[in-house]
Amino acid sequence: MSGPIIRLENVHFQYEREGDAPIQALRGVDLAIQPGEYVVILGHNGSGKSTLAKHLNALLLPTQGDVWVNGWNTRDPDRVRDVRVTVGMVFQSPDNQIVATVVEEDVAFGPENMGLPHGEIVRRVDRALEQVKMSAYRYRPPHRLSGGQKQRVAIAGMLAMRPKVLVLDESTAMLDPIGRQDILDIAHRLNRKEGVTVVAITHFMEEAVDADRLIVMAEGRIQLQGTPREVFRQVDRLRELHMDAPPITRLALALNQLHPHFPGDLLTVEEFVRAMQRHARAAAPPLFSPNGHPPPAGEKVIQYDRVGRYYMRGTPLEVKAIEGVTMHVQRGEILGIIGHTGSGKSTIIQHANALLRPHEGRVTVFGQDTRDKGVDVREIRRRVGMAFQQPEIQLFERYVGDDVAFGPRNLGLSREEVRERVREAMEAMGLDFEAFKDRMTFSLSGGEMRRVALAGILALKPEVLVLDEPTAGLDPHGREQLLAKILSWRAKGATLVMVSHNMENLAELADRLYVAARGSIIMDGSPADIFSQVEALQSEGLNAPVVTLVMQALAEKGLLPPETTRIYTVDEAASLLGGLL
């Protein structure tokens, strides 16, 4: 065929709500996607991105307007199978599309339903698992995988069908930095070498820099589109749309404001380093005082002592998830835990409020040994709140207000006290009480679900808040709001433990970091101590913040002294580099 492989004409869509006004998710979207194009769609939570994506393979049909795929109208029931074979979709949550009880069987599900010969199915499954680096897990049950590993399996299942169009709806959200890059490399290779059209939805601005075209949505409409350089240079407009530019571009713009001759539309580390080489004046490197501040030396409220934990213990499938974990959490600090997908991070933190209890070693929480039969688990869980990696796991009430109120009601508080706690918690998470309290929980976007889940924990007013990937699924504005809230909670005396793959977030917030790998703690120290060890992090499937990578590259070029690799925030880097221009 000639012309667009996907075309949307005046597409409107609304979600019907029982007993309430419908939600208008799309409002007159016109869009054409050409064969072989790599398109990235950005937008704030609730902007309509995922709703748009579900129209591309007929999971949703327009309330008004038309969607054409490969020349077929998605409204034609005789063409639905053709449309879905042509357009493969990987969802935000992998659990939504994993159907089998063994990994390789799940990856084979699509090819089997296409009626392919057995030998071809085997070849496709082998290749797809190899592409996402999950061959070693082919006989594992998916429910025994980490969130990131499940995401890889979901992607493999779609790759095995060899679609002409691959739609990735936040499909890298739960992966570690190197794992994210692996999936991006796969998508770009499919796009450039095999001609697969890619439509990627993401909240990671750095994932968009290599796209052919960016589309920015807000309020169900396309607000901006163009090349990454054209879009990201419009920083003020992006911020109006609750978006942001990648860290490299923000650093370049900060220097551009100080020195207008420095280009402000840079997108990659390599571009930035070349620009610095062109514009740096010949002068001695600036004096540098290592950054950072000593972490608070407070009471140790949670202590791990040589903790080990097995899954499926006593069966032929026994796996030791963590081993010899020794660490502690101090009152009043923000502690960060990083590690590659499957490193044991989530297992470690689930011991912090006795959701799991150690098979080896001990965990002490506010002086209580969680192994003791008489331990007051309810008291521990009141004082240590936990928000899981996937917020929908924690949501079970029909309406948002009831879900947030569940914990306070179980504390025996009065009706007025419960209502006030719910209001306060929702407002703290940027959820207008009147607008959201009667919303149906599962009508929310992924980012909104995360906010509701966090509000439900905050309503209990815990002394320690444990957050497993708290910013996953949030748009840049939502991340910024949440990070500001985390700092305000700490200022009020809260203690926070954050597991995250977002190095920039932890660079801004954490007092101390632990690095997990292969079920053990392998590194600990201040952010400057950890992030300056770039090669060691990369060897463990992690990476340093982008700013640290820039500083390292400039040091290697002789523009900066080696100790500047301890810089990891945009503001610090702009202040230092401005003196070189």
Image (spheres, rainbow, N blue to C red):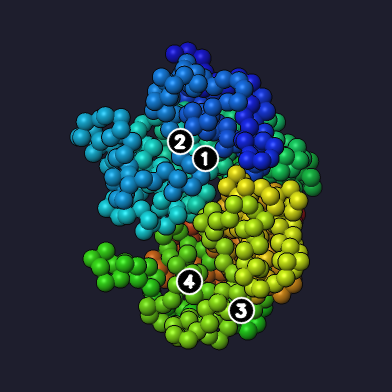
Dot label at residue 169: 1
> Residue 145: x percent and y percent?
38, 57
Name which residue lies at 54% across and 59% down.
Answer: 394
Describe the element under mark 3 as helix, strand or loop: strand
Q: Amino acid at mark 2?
A: Met
Q: Earlier in the sequence, mark 3 or mark 4?
A: 3
Crowd around label 3: few <14 · some 14–19 · many ≥20 (10 Å): many
Q: Amino acid at mark 3?
A: Gln
In the picture, measured across the screen, residue 134 lies left or right of residue 65, that is left
> Residue 77: x percent and y percent?
44, 21
Rounded to the nearest angstrom, the CA distance separating label 4 from label 2 is 34 Å
Q: Nearer the viewer, residue 172 or 376?
A: 376
Rounded to the nearest angstrom, the CA distance separating label 3 from label 4 is 20 Å
Q: Amino acid at mark 1?
A: Asp
Q: Nearer the viewer, mark 2 or mark 3?
A: 2
Residue hosting label 2: 89
Q: Earlier in the sequence, mark 3 or mark 1?
A: 1
Q: Residue furthest front?
A: 19
Is the C-beta separation of discs 2 and 3 under 8 Å?
A: no
Name which residue lies at 48% across and 62% down.
Answer: 339
Dot label at residue 330: 3
Q: Amino acid at mark 4?
A: Leu
The quarter of the picture where the N terminus appears is top left
In which image quadrant can residue 279 be found?
top right
Residue hosting label 4: 355
